[in-house]
Image (spheres, helix red, strand yellow):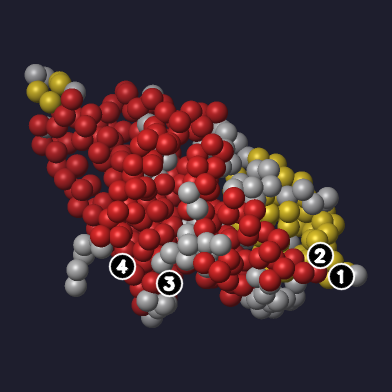
């Protein structure tokens, strides 16, 4: 058993960390959070380096990286913001549905533009009446004269409004609870698709939306897999999504803790540095333990996926624990920084807001614990 990164993995990590420091940076990330604008310039830099294709097979123009290399990438992308990481990762793990399950025509139509950064992807699962109970989707897709006609209301669809975005919509094509669902590709410019950006406290750069579908029509060939394959495909999608989220939580928790340590070492009260006070010292020591433990859970799950093994329990364990760690670390940072924590230029309030969302987005922590329990046989 060897917990060290290989030379290749360490070089990859160092390259990504340097990129985030030199090509993205704190100020750029903060500015886009405050302006609620998508970080297009940084996204293009990532596309230019070929990194959007990490999960795309080489024969389709990608890098075909394994889950461990992908987790290292996601951890680095979240260095300054979970939202920035989501701006990159959402398209990436959604593209895997086309890369691995799409038709040749779908791959030829969408993947080249995705790899260059011109085409983005979003996934739409939730609805007003179907959140944690994803199988309760009511949005319907009916096949009429060679076209899928979609009607319904979707919510919390991150990035659906961005230019050039194709939405992977989970819709009901049959009465069976699970076998009656399908994944259908719907360009966001499709007539009958009304997208409204929501004013949330997180997802400011990527943005999350509500979608109203009124007789929205797309070609019959826009279905991924076949009718009724949606539930099986989305379960695999969620495994990748939860790995990417858990890794990003670790990356941002590390920065939150590092920022807290730096601040407490430089801030003097009662004649001595804040870092010398036992209550703060112990909190930071506990957070250090937790961040490292979360990292081990993430890379355990990634390693299992890389071996081609089922990792449903492991990705849920990593996600729920890493989300809690990100929240605790940023909460302790808020306490340590005091009044300064309320200021955007100290970044901690962003870490805190986004860490709270980590307990809900991509599958609530309560659902993750239920999945873990089910995998335990209880």
Front disc: 4 or 3 = 4
Q: Residue furthest top?
A: 271
Front disc: 4 or 2 = 2
- What's the residue at 37%, 47% (across, down)? 16
Is 202 left, or right, of 281 in this rendering? right
C-beta proximity under 8 Å, tags 1 and 2 = yes
Of residues 353 and 223, which is closer to you in this image? 223
Q: Residue furthest right?
A: 145
Of residues 366 and 166, which is closer to you in this image? 166
Q: Mark 1: which secondary structure? A: loop
Residue indicated by mark 4: 300
Of residues 95 and 196, which is closer to you in this image? 95
**From this viewpoint, is residue 349 visible?**
no
Q: Mark 4: which secondary structure? A: helix
Instruction: Quarter of the image for the N terminus: give it.
Output: bottom left
Question: At which x and y percent is residue 346?
Answer: 35, 27
Residue indicated by mark 3: 312
Question: At which x and y percent is residue 263?
Answer: 23, 29
| Mark 4 vs mark 3, CA separation in Å | 12 Å
């Amino acid at each position: 058993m060897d917990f060290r990164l290989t030379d290749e993995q360490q070089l990859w990590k160092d390259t990504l960390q340097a990129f985030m420091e030199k090509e993205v940076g704190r100020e750029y990330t903060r500015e886009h959070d405050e302006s609620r604008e998508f970080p297009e310039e940084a996204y293009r830099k990532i596309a230019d380096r070929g990194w959007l294709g990490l999960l795309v097979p080489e024969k389709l123009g990608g890098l075909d990286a394994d889950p461990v290399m992908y987790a290292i990438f996601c951890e680095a992308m979240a260095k300054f913001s979970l939202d920035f990481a989501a701006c990159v990762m959402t398209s990436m793990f959604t593209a895997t549905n086309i890369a691995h399950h799409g038709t040749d025509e779908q791959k030829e139509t969408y993947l080249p533009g995705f790899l260059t950064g011109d085409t983005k992807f979003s996934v739409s699962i939730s609805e007003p009446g179907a959140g944690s109970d994803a199988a309760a989707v009511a949005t319907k897709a009916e096949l009429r004269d060679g076209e899928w006609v979609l009607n319904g209301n979707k919510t919390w669809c991150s990035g659906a409004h961005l230019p050039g975005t194709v939405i992977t919509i989970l819709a009901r094509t049959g009465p069976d609870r699970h076998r009656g669902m399908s994944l259908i590709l719907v360009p966001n410019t499709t007539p009958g698709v009304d997208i409204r950006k929501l004013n949330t406290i997180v997802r400011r750069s990527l943005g999350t939306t509500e979608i109203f579908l009124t007789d929205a029509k797309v070609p019959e060939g826009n279905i991924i897999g076949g009718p009724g394959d949606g539930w099986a495909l989305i379960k695999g999608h969620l495994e990748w999504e939860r790995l990417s989220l858990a890794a990003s939580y670790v990356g941002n928790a590390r920065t939150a803790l590092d920022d807290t340590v730096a601040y407490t070492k430089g801030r003097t009260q009662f004649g001595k540095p804040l870092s010398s006070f036992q209550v703060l010292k112990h909190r930071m020591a506990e957070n250090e333990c937790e961040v490292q433990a979360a990292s081990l859970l993430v890379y355990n799950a990634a390693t299992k996926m890389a071996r081609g093994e089922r990792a449903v329990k492991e990705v849920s364990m990593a996600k729920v624990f890493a989300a809690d760690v990100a929240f605790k670390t940023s909460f302790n940072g808020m306490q340590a920084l005091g009044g300064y924590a309320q200021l955007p230029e100290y970044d901690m309030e962003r870490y805190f807001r986004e860490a709270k969302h980590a307990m809900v987005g991509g599958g609530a922590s309560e659902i993750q614990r239920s999945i873990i329990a089910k995998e335990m046989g209880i």
